[in-house]
Amino acid sequence: MQTTLEVALIQTDLVWENPEANRKNLEQKVNGITDADLIVLPEMFSSGFTMNASKVAETMDGETITWLKALSKTKNAAIVGSLVITENENYYNRLVFVEPSGTLTTYDKRHTFTLAGEHKVYTAGSKKIIIEYKGFKICPLVCYDLRFPVWARNSEDYDVLIYVANWPKVRIAAWDALLKARAIENMSYCICVNRVGLDGNNYEYSGHSAAYDVLGNRMDSIPESIETTEVITLEKSHITKYRERLGFLKDRDTFSLEV
């Protein structure tokens, strides 16, 4: 069991609705990482945030999943991000967490973005997941999930909260504020990866990818609006120290959630 976790955040532009081009671009970026346990990609990393699901959808044994498994094994690092998946005649904005061993865990985005009509195209998920990887308990969520703190509430004593996103520049102030709040209220690391550039609908993305510690302190030096990769070290002792000293999670409310 490790006491630290090296996490690489890849803030990148995406080629609109072109999985092959995005795989090629991302593979170059991933191969440039020399030491990481976990590599985080944006939401819909193979296509951008598109409602043209039928054009870019793949299956769970398709090219992108096969590529992720091979890349994870080669780099000896887990890779997480979301892509468009078709299954049982439905489309999903599905987050995949691929480990070097070939183990693959999935999470279907719970809160589909109604403002963009995502709920009309993609089937919402209903199950929150916690992944145990190298001694850390990880809760991965997707973009619009960020606006719903009850869904992220740390009732499982997870260590790391991850958000992958295509969050536009016009609402980036909310992104910044809510990410910091999620770290503080859950007393967990919060790792957040957003894309940059213009998408096919001419929406602009400014990144603001970030890493926060359990007190809400910014850990990274990622600049906005440019493609970049940064590796952050997460320490188990940091979590234990402040949870034991402050005890805030012991006072959390107990509730049941209907989905």
Image (cartoon, grey):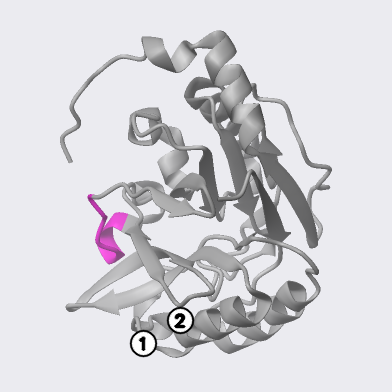
Label 2, label 1: how far apart the Cα atoms are? 6 Å
Decide if residue 18 is in sight here.
Answer: no
Taking the magenta stretch, the answer to whether it contains residue 122 is: yes
Compared to 177, does 164 lie above or below? below
Could you tell whether 28 is left or right of 81 in the image?
A: right
Give the residue displayed 49% in from the left and 11% down from the top.
Answer: 247
Quadrant of the rendering where the C terminus is positioned: top left
Give the residue displayed 25% in from the left and 50% down from the top.
Answer: 127
Taking the magenta stretch, the answer to whether it contains residue 219 is: no
Q: Position of residue 85 (x, y in %)?
A: 35, 75
Q: Which mark is residue 65?
A: 2
Name the kind of residue labelled 1 in the image.
Answer: Asp
Residue in front for this viewpoint, 230 or 249:
249
Could you tell whether 217 is left or right of 134 in the image?
A: right
Q: Position of residue 18 (x, y in %)?
A: 56, 84
Bounds of the magenta segment: 119-126
Give the residue displayed 40% in from the left and 70% down from the top.
Answer: 104
Q: Position of residue 59 (x, y in %)?
A: 34, 83
Decide if residue 221 is in sight here.
Answer: yes
Give the residue displayed 29% in from the left and 78% down from the top.
Answer: 86
Compared to 217, does 15 lie above or below? below
Label 2 crowd bin: few (<14), some (14–19), many (20+), radius 10 Å: some
- Could you tell me what secondary structure mostly forms the magenta stretch? loop
CB atoms of marks 2 and 1 within 8 Å = yes
Query: What residue sits right under mark 1 in the picture?
Result: 61
Q: Which mark is residue 218?
A: none
